[in-house]
């Protein structure tokens, strides 16, 4: 997150742009991919623009990365109660 803050101060990134956050994380984790989404309140269905849930690609010894960040999470899972 510090790298993202530095990028925002330098004018290289936007504060609430998800792809800019992932780019900052990727700088120090070469080969690994990151993905995430803004938090959804299950009661109202409203997505918070100041709370991001993120996850990193998992590395399996001898096999490499799993590719999990490329999986799209269906919207129905954001509303599970």
Image: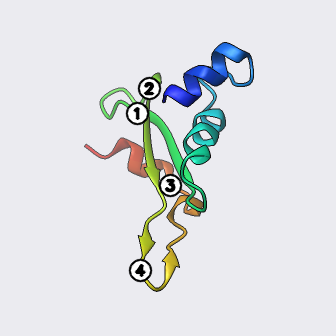
Corner quadrant of residue 40: top left
In the displayed orientation, state which residue is furthest to the left: 81
Residue sitting at 55 percent across and 63 percent down? 71
The reply to whether the C-beta atoms of the residues labelled 1 and 4 are less than 8 Å apart is no
Give the label on residue 40, or none: 1
Residue position for label 4:
61
Residue 4 point in image, percent of width and height: 58, 28
Which residue occupies the foreground of this view, 17 or 22? 22
Which residue occupies the foreground of this view, 65 or 40? 65
Q: Earlier in the sequence, mark 1 or mark 2?
A: 1
Corner quadrant of residue 61: bottom left
How far apart are the alpha carbons under marks 1 and 2?
A: 6 Å
Disc 1 is placed on an element classified as strand
How far apart are the alpha carbons under marks 3 and 4?
A: 29 Å
Q: Which mark is in front, 1 or 4?
A: 4
Residue sitting at 50 percent across and 73 percent down? 66
**Mark 1 neighbour class, 10 Å CA radius: few under 14, some 14 to 19, many 20 or more:** some
**Mark 2 neighbour class, 10 Å CA radius: few under 14, some 14 to 19, many 20 or more:** few
Residue 20 point in image, percent of width and height: 65, 34
Relative to residue 46, is residue 11 drawn left or right?
right
Disc 3 is placed on an element classified as loop
Disc 4 is placed on an element classified as loop
**Mark 4 neighbour class, 10 Å CA radius: few under 14, some 14 to 19, many 20 or more:** few
């Amino acid at each position: 997150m510090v790298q993202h803050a530095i990028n925002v101060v330098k004018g290289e990134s936007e504060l609430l742009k998800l792809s800019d956050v992932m780019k900052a994380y990727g700088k120090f984790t070469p080969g690994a991919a990151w993905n995430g989404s803004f938090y959804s309140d299950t009661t109202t269905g409203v997505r918070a623009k100041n709370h991001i849930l993120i996850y990193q690609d998992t590395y399996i010894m001898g096999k490499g990365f799993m590719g999990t960040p490329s999986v799209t999470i269906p919207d129905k899972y954001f509303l599970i109660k």
